[in-house]
Image (tube, grey):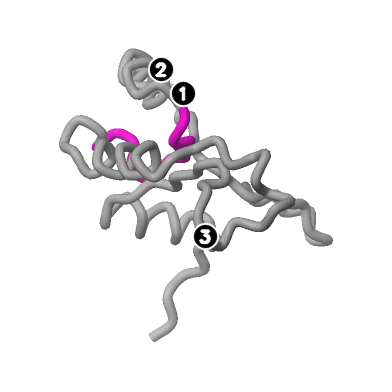
């Protein structure tokens, strides 16, 4: 039995929301594998990336499921903006496009 057509971004949003998860980004972290050209950009630390991941796994960060977070953002500021983030559906990455049929997705 075929499922009704659902745009890919809606499927992935649904999966992420059900399972829980966020897109966490950090800058370059200095390791033994960091190339010389990236060394000046190696500003983030293992602790910063780990701290962001631990916070996202907490009950208080549940509202961030399916959303984007930079590890360098102030968590207290994100929490303070929680209602705005939810009500305006912020911090989500979407892909949209216009196709020859005139259909707009996104």
Which label was assigned to residue 88? 1
User: Looking at the image, which residue is at 65% across and 40% down?
Assistant: 41
Q: In the shown orientation, is residue 69 left or right of residue 38? A: left
Which label was assigned to residue 84? 2
> In what element is the residue under mark 2?
helix
User: Looking at the image, which residue is at 78% across and 58% down?
Assistant: 99
Residue 74 sits inside the magenta stretch: no
Q: In the shown orientation, is residue 41 left or right of residue 98? A: left
> In what element is the residue under mark 1?
loop
User: Which mark lies nearer to you, 2 or 3?
Assistant: 3
**Observer-nearest of 65 and 100:** 65
- Residue underneath mark 3: 32
Between the residue at mark 1 and the residue at mark 3, the CA separation in whole angstroms equals 41 Å
- Give coordinates of residue 106: x percent, y percent: 62, 47
Between the residue at mark 1 and the residue at mark 2, the CA separation in whole angstroms equals 6 Å
Pointers 1 and 2 in contact (CB under 8 A)? Answer: yes
């Amino acid at each position: 039995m075929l499922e009704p057509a659902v745009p890919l971004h809606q499927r992935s949003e649904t999966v992420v929301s059900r399972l829980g998860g966020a897109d966490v980004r950090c800058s370059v972290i200095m390791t033994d594998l960091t190339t010389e050209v990236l060394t000046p950009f190696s500003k983030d630390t293992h602790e910063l990336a780990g701290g962001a991941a631990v916070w996202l796994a907490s009950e208080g960060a549940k509202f961030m499921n399916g959303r984007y977070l930079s590890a360098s953002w102030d968590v207290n500021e994100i929490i303070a903006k929680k209602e705005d983030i939810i009500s305006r559906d912020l911090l989500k990455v979407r892909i949209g496009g216009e196709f020859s049929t005139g259909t707009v997705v996104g």
